[in-house]
Image (cartoon, rainbow, N blue to C red):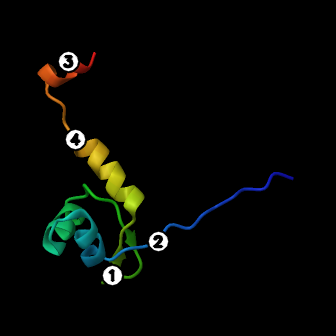
Amino acid sequence: MNEVNLEQERLLSPKQLSEIVGLSPAQIRALMNTGKLEFVEISSKTKMLTMSGWERFQKNATKVNKAERSAVN
């Protein structure tokens, strides 16, 4: 039988994530409201985030201009 190691990720409030990443809680909530930042809806009033969700947002939101891309290749 295969054993799966599932590690539960810590859930963060918008305020906690904002303190870690250097944005305001309002900016975090705006990203959540526009669907750019994923979250876990615990209840209609409680929405929590994860660092892996923040990392995915950063990866998707980071744009590299053509000059920088050419320099890398």
Q: Marks 2 and 1: CB-CB under 8 Å?
A: no
Mark 2 vs mark 3: in front: 3
Q: Amino acid at mark 2?
A: Arg
Mark 3 vs mark 1: in front: 3
Q: Amino acid at mark 3?
A: Ala
Q: Which mark is residue 58?
A: none
Label 2 element class:
loop
Q: Amino acid at mark 1?
A: Ser
Q: Residue at x 23, y 70 (%)?
A: 18
54 w.r.t. 26: above or below: above
The furthest residue to the front: 71
Quadrant of the image occupied by residue 60:
top left
Q: Which mark is residue 10?
A: 2
Q: Count residues near mark 2 (Cα–Cα under 10 Å), then give few for <14, some for 14-19, many for 20+.
A: few
The furthest residue to the right: 1
Q: CA distance from mark 4 to mark 1?
A: 30 Å
Q: Earlier in the sequence, mark 4 or mark 1?
A: 1
User: Which of the two residues, 1 or 20, is positioned nearer the viewer here?
Assistant: 20
Q: Count residues near mark 1 (Cα–Cα under 10 Å), then give few for <14, some for 14-19, many for 20+.
A: few
Q: Marks 3 and 4: CB-CB under 8 Å?
A: no
Name the residue carrying label 3. Answer: 71
Q: CA distance from mark 2 to mark 1?
A: 20 Å
58 w.r.t. 71: above or below: below
